[in-house]
Image (cartoon, coloured by chain):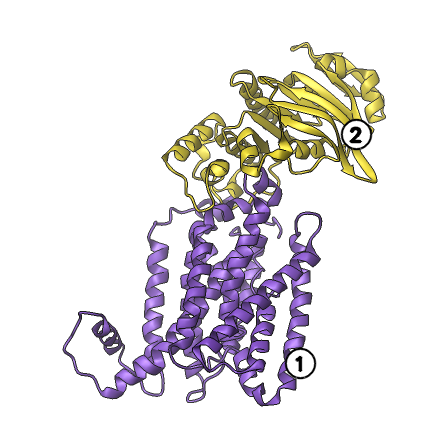
Chain colours: A yellow, B purple
Amino acid sequence: MSAPLVLSEISLGYPDRMVLADVSLTVESGEVFAVVGPNGVGKSSLIKAVSGILPCQRGQVDVYGVPVSELNPAQRARQIAVVPQATHVPPAFTARQVVAMGRTPYLGWLEREGPDDRVKTDAALERSGTLALAGRRMGELSGGEQQSVLIGRALAQDASIMLLDEPTSHLDLRHQDRILKLVRTLAHDQGMAVLIALHDLNLVARFADRVGLLSDGSLRKQGDPRQVLTPKDLAAAYGIEIRVLEHPVYGTPLVLTG
Amino acid sequence: MSDTGRRPTAAKTAADPRPVSRWAPWLWTSGSLLVMLVLSAAVGSVTLPPLSIVQMVVDKLPGVDLGIVWPATFRTILFDIRLPHTVLIALAGMALGGSGAAYQGLFRNPLADPYIIGVASGAGLGAVLAMTASWPTTLLGMAAVPVAAFVGAVLTVGLVYTIARVGRSAPVTTLLLAGVAVGTFASAITSLLMLLSTNELYRAISWLLGGFSLGGWQPVLVSLPYLAIGLGSLALLGRPLNVLQFGDEEATALGLDTEKFKLVIVIAASLVAATAVAFSGIIAFVGLIVPHLVRMLWGVDYRRLILLATIGGGTVLLAADIVSRTILAPRALPVGIVTSVVGAPFFLYLLRRAKREVFW
C-alpha cells in the first residue's frame, strides 16, 4: 500500500523564479506533519500544490500512488480535504449548509443531497464539535467557531488526507488549543494523514509528530520536532537568535527569541 | 466584494436568521406575480375589470365553459393586445431577475448584472446588427434577433473574460472593469450603426429604451424556448453555485470543476439575458435589484434564490410597466426610463444598507 501523500522533488513557482525547489516528503496515515518556516517561504504554495490547485513546475505529488495531476477535482476531493483559513467565509450560509458542501465531490451538478449525505453531514458536525452551531449563520460565529465549521466541512468530504493552511493564526489561545487537539485526534485516533502549515513553533512542537522546516526556497530539514526545532537550524531559517528550552510539562521543545 | 460587517454587532443580527417558512417566499413572489399579471392586463385606455380577466382566461382553458358573455371587444383587447404585451413584459422581467442572480453568484459580486459586465451591450449590438440588416417581420426573421443577441452576448463575455483573465481564473475586479470597457465599446458601435441607418433610428431607439413595440404573440413564442432552457438550467444549478461562493480555489478543492461550471453558468445566463435584450431592449436595474431584495428577505441560498429572483423579476417589471403606461397616459413611456428612475436611488439606498448589514 502506497503512503497517502508522497511529494517527490517538487518545485513550485514560475519558470524564471522558483519559490520552492526539490521538496520531498511523505505523510503517513495517523500522523500530523507540520510545515514551518518564515513568512513568504512557500508554506501556502506547498499546501496548494498538494491539493492540486497550483501545478508543480517539476516533480510530482502522489496520492496513494496516483499522481494528483491525473485526478479530476471530484476524485481529488474524495481523497484530500483542504481546510483554508477562515478569513473570507461567506457570512450568510448556516454552519450546516457549509458542512453539507463537503459532500460536493459525491454529487453531480444537478443532484441534491440525499439521506446518506445528510447522515454524513450530521456526523461531520458532531466530529468537529459544531453540532450546536448548525443552525447559525457563519457571520455570527467567532473566528474559532468558523474554523471548526470548515474542519467539519472537510470531514464531510470523507477523505483520508487533510491539509490545513494556518488554521490557528487568527485565533486566541483557547481556540488554537481546541482546533489543534481536534486535528491531532483526527490523525491519531481516526487514522487521517494530516499536513498542516503553521507558523507558531511552540504549537508545532506540541502537536506535530513530524516537522519540515522550509527556508531559502527549499526544505532545510525534516523529522521529529526535537531534531528539527534546534537553535542552529531555526536561527539559520529565521535570521535571528533563537533559544530552545524544554517545555516544563510536556518535555517538548519550547522556542523563544532573543 | 468586501467583508465589511462580517462580524456584525450581536444585537443587529441575533434575530436575523429567523426560521423562514419553507413556503412563504414562494407564496409571496408567485402571489404578487399573479396580481401584477392581472393588473397589467386590466390597465389601459379601456379598463378591463380584473374579475372578468380571470374569468375570460379560465373560460379559455380546454374543457371549461363558464357560460358568461362578455362584450366582443373585451376578448379582442385581452387576448390580442393586452395579454401578449403583459406576458412578454413578465418574461423579460423574469429573464433579467434570473440572469442577474446568476451573474451575481458567478462573480460573487452583488454589483454584477447583465449590464455591468457588458453582456447586455454585446447582446444589444448583436440585435441591432440583425435589425439593421433587415427588420424582422416574420417568425423566422424574429428568431434571428435573439440568436444574434445571444452570439453578441457570448462573444462579449468571452472577450471580457479573456481580457480579465489572470492565469487560470478571472478576478472579480478586472472582470467588472473589462466588462465596463467592452460594454461601452459595444454601445458606441451600436449607436454608430443606428445613426448610419437613419430610417430605422426611431424604432431602434425606442427598442433600446425598453419600449415593447412588437405586437402579438410571436415574440412570446419565440423567446419561450430560450428562456425555458436558460432559466431552467440556472435554477437547477443552485447547489454548486452555493459552493462557488467560497471562491474558485476553495470550490475546486471541494471537488467542483470550477472552470467548466463557470462556463456553463455564463452560457445559460447569457442566453437568458440576450433573449431579454432582444425583445425588450435595455432595461436597467431589474437584474441588479431584484436578486438583492430576494437575498435580503430570504437569504443567499442559490437553490431557491435563482427561481425566486426570476419570479420577482417578472413582478417588478410588470409593476414598472404599469407605471410607464399610466403616469403620462395616454402616452406610454419606455419602461427602461421607469426602472432607471426608481431603480437608481433604490440601489444607492441598498448600497448604504450593505455597509451595515450582512445579507451578502
Which residue is nearer to you in this view: A175 or A48? Answer: A48
Disc sitting over residue A21 in the figure: 2
Residue drawn at x 39%, y 72% is B221
Q: Give the x, y percent position of residue B258.
A: 58, 46
Report helix, strand or loop for mark 2: strand
Left or right of residue A97: residue B181: right
Element on which disc 1 rests:
helix
B260 relative to A13 in the view: left or right: left
- Reading the image, the residue beneath label 1 is B192
Asked if marks 2 and 1 touch (Cβ < 8 Å), the reply is no
Whether residue B67 sits left or right of residue B151 in the image: it is left
Chain ID, mark 2:
A
Q: Residue at x 76, y 22 (%)?
A: A213
- The three-letter amino acid code for the residue at tag 1 is Leu
Q: Looking at numbered disc 2 in the image, what kind of residue is underneath it? A: Ala
Rendered view: A63 above or below B179: above
Q: Is residue B304 visible in this depiction of the protein? A: yes
